[in-house]
Image (cartoon, grey):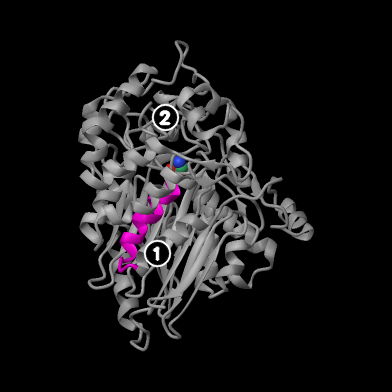
Amino acid sequence: MITPPRILLCFLVLILTWNTHANTQPQQHAIATAHPLATEAGMAILRKGGNAFDAAVTVSAVLGVVEPYSSGLGGGGFWLLHRANDGKQVMIDGRETAPLAAHRDMYLDKSGEPIPKLSIDGPLAAGIPGAPAALAHIAEQYGVLPLQKTLAPAIKLAREGFMVDAYYRRMASFRLTALRADHTSAQQFLLEHQIPPKNHRLRQPDLANTLQALAESGRDGFYAGEVARKLVTGVRQAGGIWTLQDLQRYQIIERQPLIGQYQNARITSASLPSSGGVVLMQMLNMLGHFDDLDQQNPADRTHLLVETMRRAYQDRARYLGDSDFVDVPLNHLLSPVYAKQQANSIDRYKASISSPMTAGKPEGADTTHFSIIDQQGNRVAATLSINYPFGACFVPPGTGVLLNDEMDDFSIKPGAPNAYGLVGNQANAIEPGKRMLSSMSPTFVETENQVTILGTPGGSRIISMVLLGALEAIKQTPVETWVNTPRFHHQYLPDAIQFEPHALSENTIIQLRSKGHKLKPLNNQYGNMQAIIWNKRTNKMSAASDHRGIGKAVIFPATD
Ligand code: GLY
């Protein structure tokens, strides 16, 4: 992964000028996840002597059991790690890959039009999962506890069950038709084909057995042997294209995270095949040309942020894809010269117009994020997904593994030229073995005195949410405030500012309209941010779990 040399140099200067009065170890642990049971399981592992990486394995696995609509063994994700003893920072890329039999036009009909739902429901929608390999790798390379210990809470919750809550019911109702269409999914996630009532105990014995196999045999417990055979048989019998070879050849990749600088902060975020870090850095690089951003009135500030979002998301649609398969002009996109040129193209008084092109469609909105720091200063920001709520709504019989529908994150109909001859999304076209472009953006923001760990689900809106959060973290706004503040978003196309209820005042809306912006008020809130701040000067921690979700953030001493 390329980090432009100038950014590295700036970063080095930044580090050398930071003073040394800051604490180097937090002395406390903190965890923020989207589900209380995952937070509690992570706490228990840290209390048993595990480190943040062990807790990350536990939390990932438990979330896959109790939030089956968001992530799981049948999905993938990005785990951003910082190891305290040597400062190593790495992104574990456990993103799904396209099966070897996949091809560019596999979701198109004879006339070249997308076949509805084919990339969303059922086994053809599923990429080869990366989560099990990522958990095995993190445990082996970074943890201090064996998988038998770190997966035990998830195995127990899968076997003994957890209580269905209102959030689960909402997600299941959204995907009820697709869940009913697959016999095994209906058995696992519904009750006599209906949404289970609140406080129904949902048991997943097949999933417990698969987790057990992973605990006993590591990655081979999933990608080889009986589990692999059942996965492939189930997929193929239902019309899918997976082979045993797809599973055997799946590899996680340790990637260099993307590192950038904004004002006095170092930003570390996801590298390709997530677009998150690139788009985030592009926006921050542009914003670096507006020193007066925070002196602006709300309308003018929103305008500047929206215009940087518009430009960065346009480049996302044009250029980004799996850089192991396509050339992505990263040096150009992240160069100071380009940032200046882009910033100069922003008119403070007038909205730009997003000219039509083959735009990326919004990605599935269901995903999960957690943030962890341990007493030694090891930290993890991880964003995990199976894409749409309940993924592909397909469980290969006998596995308990709900498969993702991340294939829908590829560009299903790439290369169609628009009226201006622009060709969009070719970089994200389907190819065998390729990783689909993601927006997941686990991020660290570091200033002299403060470390912030943040991320959120939310499809294509993830990156703008992380931008808004990071800007507040740099200003040292309390974490509970910015995690819960109403949000706005622009993604080039559709050419409109989307905003949550109460995100923009009436006056701001009027002023934005007068600049030429189109506005799209949303009825619902979005995102489910989980964030932690460690103030290195006071050695105090703060943590927040988004009030939009049902998660839990805790800070607790290393020993009671
Ligand atoms: N499936 C959501 C993402 O990867 O961005």
Evaluate whether residue 50 shows in this view. yes
Total labels drawn: 2
The amino acid at mark 1 is Ala
Pick the front one: 205 or 412 = 205
User: What residue range appears in magenta?
Assistant: 48-64
Mark 1 C-beta to ligand 1 under 8 Å: no
Residue 8: give x, y in percent of width and height: 29, 67
Residue at x-position 24% and y-position 51%: 137
Query: Which of the two marks, 1 or 2, is nearer to us in this view?
Result: 1
Dot 1 alpha-carbon crowd within 10 angstroms: few under 14, some 14 to 19, many 20 or more: some
Ligand 1 in which quarter: top left
- Return the residue found at the far front: 160
Residue 76: give x, y in percent of width and height: 37, 43
Task: Say the numbered circle drawn on residue 395.
Answer: 2
Q: Is residue 153 magenta?
A: no
* Residue identified by numbered label 1: 44
Evaluate whether residue 317 shows in this view. no
Residue 432: give x, y in percent of width and height: 28, 28
Residue 548: give x, y in percent of width and height: 62, 55
In terms of secondary structure, where does tag 2 sit? loop
In terms of secondary structure, where does tag 1 sit? helix
Q: Is residue 55 magenta?
A: yes
Residue at x-position 24% and y-position 39%: 221
Task: Say the numbered circle drawn on residue 288.
Answer: none
Residue at x-position 53% and y-position 28%: 179
